[in-house]
Structure formats: structure tokens, C-alpha cells
Image (tube, grey):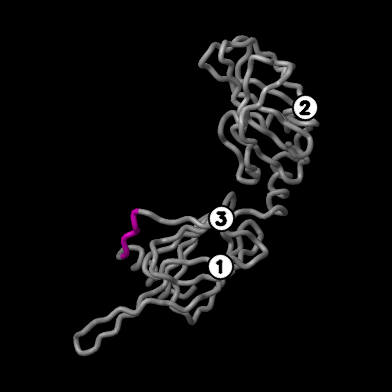
Amino acid sequence: MRTPVKRALALALLATPLPSIAQTVTALPDQTSTVRLSNRDINHVVCTGGEIEDVRFSAEKAIAVERAGSDAWIKFLVREIDDAGMVTRSFVTVPSEFFITCNGAVYALYAEPSDIPAQTVMLQPGAPQRARANEELLGPLVEEERAVSITLSMLQDRIPASFTSVAPRSGPIRLATLPGATLEERRRIEIDGSGLSASEYLVSAAGGAQLDERGFLDGALGANIFAITLDRGGNIEAGEAARLIVVRRGAGQ
């Protein structure tokens, strides 16, 4: 990028106040995503789980771009016209295309400049990128260690960006093996490329219950259960809840 453009963006970053509320949109690789970007404020692009390696766009257009690590900032430059002391500002309205390389994948953005607040564009990994990242994360581990790693990531609320969130099952779940307990699926993830999926449940009992991990080996929680972990064992009292992690081979049900 040419030095004058960098200088223009630096000045814009200093002179342009960021709005208090920014909107967030999502883009996927290997397809063109149409997004509306602010033609007044600085827009933010985030490479989820990696770094932005390159940003390509038409150099002749009034656009300034800076990138650093996982972030890039896009500013449509404002043109000021001085007509005998009367200064008017002209904002960009012509759409532009951006080709952003993130985690080795190319994201094509068709950006429509609009009079809206600053936007944040999240570049989410596609299935091939997620599978590659999961292979790097879990590949060196044996299957039992993979289950432990997945379980800990859920219990510690540190789920990798390459794991895919899936809508959890709605409504209470009751098991024949634990008639006094009620389960609520809190979240569900699928791990592309690993052949594994997992769910977190909250387990409660109106009158209290004795919990044993073996009691959750029930088809209602999946046909191919591989690992079960309770964050606490023994009794739960009325009003208490235990966290249950179920790791399965294949997708959940």
C-alpha cells in the first residue's frame, strides 16, 4: 500500500470518532458475501482464529486499508470540495470488492458503502479450514485424549473457534435410568474432521438425586456415546445443578 494512503488512514483513525454501537456481520470463504459498510466511520474486519495475510482492492478507489494480525480496518475516504469558501463533503456510494486472505482462505466481500454506523465483519472459517485447524489441534492426540481435550474446553468455556456451534435441543430431557433428574442441553458443538461431537447439559432434580456417570449412558443423549463427564459427583440437592459433558462419535441427535 502506498505511503499517502497509509497516512490518510492514520489521519482518519485519529480524526474520526468511532460510534458507540457497531454492527456485526459474518462472512464465509469461497463465496461472495454482500455487506453494507459505513461510508463515514472506520469498519473493522476480524479473521476468526487466525491472521489476515492480505487485502486486495481497487487502488484507484477512495479507500484506505490497514491490517495488523487478525484485524483489518477499512475507511472510505471523504472528499471535500471547496467552492469559494463553501466546503461540502462527498461520501463514497459506489460499491467496491475486497478479497481478503484469512487463514489461507480467500473471502470475497462486495461492499456497499452506506450512511450507517461502523460495521464489524467476522471472517468465519469454512468447513475445510475448520477441519484443518481441528487436525492441528487434535491430530497428535489419541482418541481418549481428544475426548478429554474437548471436555475441558467446554467445562472451562474456552471452546476453539474451529469447533462449530449447533443449536441445542429445546425442552427438558428425562432419562429412564435417572427418573428424578431433568436435563437441559445448554450447548452443542461439532468438530469437523474429527468425527466427534459434544453436548453440555445442566442436570437438576427437584427433590435431589444421586448422580453416577454410568446413569447417563442412555440413547436419549446419543447413539454413539464415547465419553461422559460430570463436573461433580455424588448428590445434588434441590435447587442445585451439575454440568454434564457428553462426547459422541458422529453428530449428536
Residue 18 shown in magenta: yes
Name which of mark 2 and mark 1 comes first in the sequence: 1
Mark 1: amino acid = Thr
Q: Residues within 10 Å of mark 3 (few under 14, many from 20)?
A: many
Q: Where does label 3 land, which residue?
A: 47
Side (left or right) of 56 relative to 246: left
Q: Where does label 2 land, which residue?
A: 219
Residue 146 in the image: state x and y as whole percent.
73, 33
Q: Which one is in front, 227 or 72?
A: 227
**1 or 3: mark nearer the eye:** 1
Mark 3: amino acid = Cys
Residue 24 in the image: state x and y as whole percent.
48, 55
Q: Measured along the vertical axis of the image, is residue 138 above or below residue 92?
A: above
Q: Magenta stretch: give its range.
A: 16-20
Image-quadrant location for residue 172:
top right
Q: Measured along the vertical axis of the image, is residue 120 above or below residue 251?
A: below
Q: Where does label 1 land, which residue?
A: 34
Mark 2: amino acid = Gly
Quadrant, the C terminus: top right
Q: Residue at x 67, y 23 (%)?
A: 174
Q: Residues within 10 Å of mark 2 (few under 14, many from 20)?
A: few
